Amino acid sequence: MNDDNEKVGSRRRSVRKGQYYEMALDYRPARPRLTWENAAALAPGTRVLAPPPGRRGFPEYSEQPRFLFEKKRVRQPLDIREFHSFWLLSDPAKMVFQTVDHAGFAFAACDVSVSRGTYDGPRYWLCDATRVLDALDEEQSRLEIGIRDDPKYNDFGKKYYKFGSGAKLVFNKDAVGSAHVFRMAFCFRTVICDQALKDACKEAGLLGIKFNNALDI
């Protein structure tokens, strides 16, 4: 096979439908509702949980994040929900994430209680997708690429990605390597996974997450 044919074959493999997905939260009414009880201890002043400056993951907490669920038992509680800069996971969701890509996530154990009675449900964890890859094939993708010119943003003066409905994200397989999950460089809020992680979440019946095909977001 000549060089031109090799390039064409590689391009076709890189855009195979269903290969990569944006991991997005399913914003149905959260079940159960919760209250963060020790905000003053863990985030004095801001009352917002966020990664340490300049990296993903968790700071050293003085105590475990503590949540109060409003009901003891809830029909089909969500396994994954957003909480500030992180996700709040049930124990089954943590098990799936760790099994598929143990190096791609960080976890912080949480204390859970209920307003009445004794909590007897699954453990919960804060979760952060910590791997960041510069893996986007910009030539084949369809999105806005620019330089941040607003000084109120942390990435002022740096490249950024922005996309909405109708975007197409194509990733370089060599840059992704063996990773099953990663954040996009220049669009840090976006978490991308492959077919293996998507299938594992579906097989486990996890509630609270959906997967948008990266080729047609």
Image (cartoon, rainbow, N blue to C red):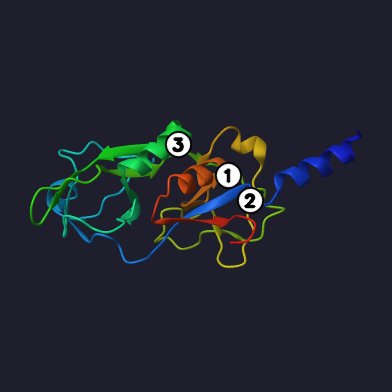
Residue drawn 66% across and 42% down?
Answer: 172
User: Is residue 196 shown left or right of residue 60?
Assistant: right
Pointer 1 residue: 195
User: Is residue 214 shown left or right of residue 129?
Assistant: right
CB of mark 1 within 8 Å of CB of mark 3?
no
* SS under mark 3: helix
Is residue 5 visible in the rendered image? The answer is: yes
Q: Position of residue 200 (x, y in %)?
A: 49, 42
Q: Is residue 165 above or below residue 193?
A: below
Is residue 53 visible in the rendered image? The answer is: no
* SS under mark 2: loop
* SS under mark 1: helix
Question: Badge 1: few (under 14), some or many (20 or more) residues near its Cα, within 10 Å?
Answer: some
Q: CA distance from mark 2 to mark 1?
A: 7 Å
Q: Amino acid at mark 3?
A: Gly
Q: Quadrant of residue 129?
A: top left
- Chain-order first, disc 2 or disc 1: 2
Q: CA distance from mark 3 to mark 2?
A: 20 Å
Q: Position of residue 90 (x, y in %)?
A: 31, 46
Pointer 3 residue: 104
Q: Amino acid at mark 1?
A: Gln
Pointer 2 residue: 18
Residue drawn 44% across and 31% down?
Answer: 103
Q: Is residue 53 above or below residue 74?
A: above
